[in-house]
Image (cartoon, rainbow, N blue to C red):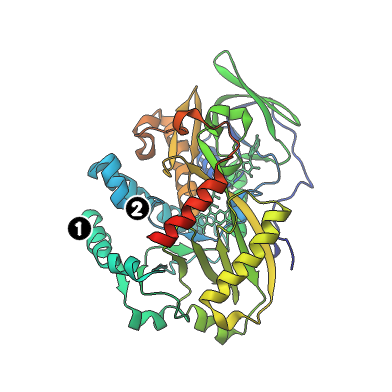
Amino acid sequence: MNQQIYWHTTVHMPDDSNLRPIPENVDVAIIGGGYTGLSAARTLAKRGVKVSVLEANTIGWGASSRNGGMTLTGLKPSMHTVIKNYGRDVAKRLFQCSLDSVDTVEQVVYEENIDCGFARYGHLYAASKQNHFDGFKDEVEFMSKEFDHKVRIVSPDEMGDEIGSSHYHGAIVDEVSGGLNPAQYVTGLAAAAERAGATLHARARVNRLERSGTRFLVETERGRVTADKILVGTSGYTGHITKKLQRKIIPIGSFIIATEKLPDEFAHELIPKNRMIFDSMHYLNYFRLWDDRMIFGGRAAFFPENASTIRRSADILRREMIKVYPQLKDVKVEYVWGGTLDFAFDMMTHVGEMDGIYYSLGYAGHGVAMASHLGKTVAEAMLDGTIKDHPFAGFDFPGAPLGLYNGFPWFLPFAGAWHKILDWIE
Ligand SMILES: Cc1cc2nc3c(=O)[nH]c(=O)nc-3n(C[C@H](O)[C@H](O)[C@H](O)COP(=O)(O)OP(=O)(O)OC[C@H]3O[C@@H](n4cnc5c(N)ncnc54)[C@H](O)[C@@H]3O)c2cc1C
């Protein structure tokens, strides 16, 4: 089995064969070349701003070319929790933002003619336990009443229309969500940002960031640039140069396997409507088809990707996949890879300005749509001076309780064990 990102075999990813020199001055320097940074760069460049994206590796190297491609409505915390914590009005604005985020992806793909297979396939939220399904009926009414958002129950009898598996107790379908090929999408987004006039710099890790009068001095491994404004879009790879942000973000590994290409009809039986599927466990699995391959992901190990967590995840994910689809037991798994997600301590996404530095972080596994949308809207707010009015800027960005975190997530094994216990009892 290849420890290689399957999506990268489907497109010519941006590489480092033609490195541009780092400019001396820009209006805005963006740190991180994923959906957040590229979407912001495209927006700013279209408004005539001189903008550069500084990326430590190659453009699109991070989670943006490794993910499941699920372009989802909703936030990571349940909307019940969001209402409880922030009230109805804020919750409504945030949920609307999640709907707008899928629209943003659709619009960018259309405007920039990005060939990434985006379509509104809908998502299927599958109940792993009977008591989870029992709660789904209330959920459908709640989403309709509070957010005027129509989702639909799939009863156990109807599950055969949605999935070739008897593993689940029923589901909720949300037709608004979509799916795409993440590597093709990020490659297209990078090309769009460049066409708009942004400059993209691979192998330009930012090693130091400091104020210099009214501007910022940004020291990269290939040279220095000064900028009026800085946007941080480093997600799960946020490091010491933005220490205060690093201490608010927990990097968590997520892993995916891709099977060999399956016969067309067999693949179709597994997920007849090409839905994006995820289950209702804390230690959740998510899966979908692409080009007749089963793409099956999960939080198989909590620590970020390395050769060992990837190897272990391959075995765990294969076992999980066969639990859901026993008919895949003789199918070859050809690829396995991992990437790092960014979780805030409250599991919410946060945007804002800290010490004059703008940021958009904490997508908690919802970044395909949200990072694309917030990259755009934070860029607009930076220019218009309205960041405080952004829906995701209106609440606290908490750090670790008692400040017991310096960027190394020592507590992940405990959090992993805690999630396993929750899955067992809830
Ligand atoms: C395995 C996996 C599956 C996922 N599945 C889904 C899914 O199905 N649906 C969904 O909505 N979301 C999913 N996600 C989450 C989603 O991919 C992310 O939320 C999204 O890609 C974040 O985009 P970003 O641009 O903010 O960060 P990234 O794409 O991670 O980019 C951050 C970049 O910052 C760079 N960087 C870090 N430090 C520096 C520095 N000092 N100088 C310069 N550059 C730096 C890194 O090299 C990296 O390329 C998944 C994530 C993973 C890992």
Name the residue located 62 percent from the left edge and 55 percent from the top edge.
65
Q: Nearer the viewer, residue 419 or 341?
A: 419
Please name the residue that numbered disc 1 is placed on.
Answer: 145
> Where is residue 418 shown, x and y percent of the image?
47, 51
Given residues 317 and 195, the one toward you in this image is: 317
How would you rate the neighbour count of disc 2 (Cα within 10 Å): few for under 14, some for 14-19, many for 20 or more? Answer: few
Would you place residue 262 above or below residue 380 in this image? below
Whether residue 126 is visible to the viewer of this picture, yes or no, is: yes
Say if 49 sits above or below 311 in the image. above
Asked if residue 5 can be seen in this view, the reply is no
Nearer the observer, disc 2 or disc 1? 2
Q: Amino acid at mark 1?
A: Lys
Give the residue at x 69% y 77%: 332
Could you say where residue 49 lies in the image, as x and y percent from the top left?
54, 33
Does the beta carbon at disc 1 come under 8 Å from ligand 1?
no
Pointer 2 and pointer 1: residues touching (CB < 8 Å)? no
Tag 2's secondary structure?
loop
Amino acid found under the numbered disc labelled 2: Ser
Q: Which residue is mark 2?
A: 78
Q: Nearer the viewer, residue 92 or 282?
A: 282
Residue extending farthest top? 213
Please tell me in which quadrant of the rendered image residue 321 appears.
bottom right
Q: Earlier in the sequence, mark 2 or mark 1?
A: 2
Under circle 1, the secondary element is helix
Is residue 175 positioned above or below 354 on the image? below
* Residue 161 position by quadrant: bottom left
- Left-right relation of 282 to 174: right
Cα–Cα gap, marks 2 and 1 = 15 Å
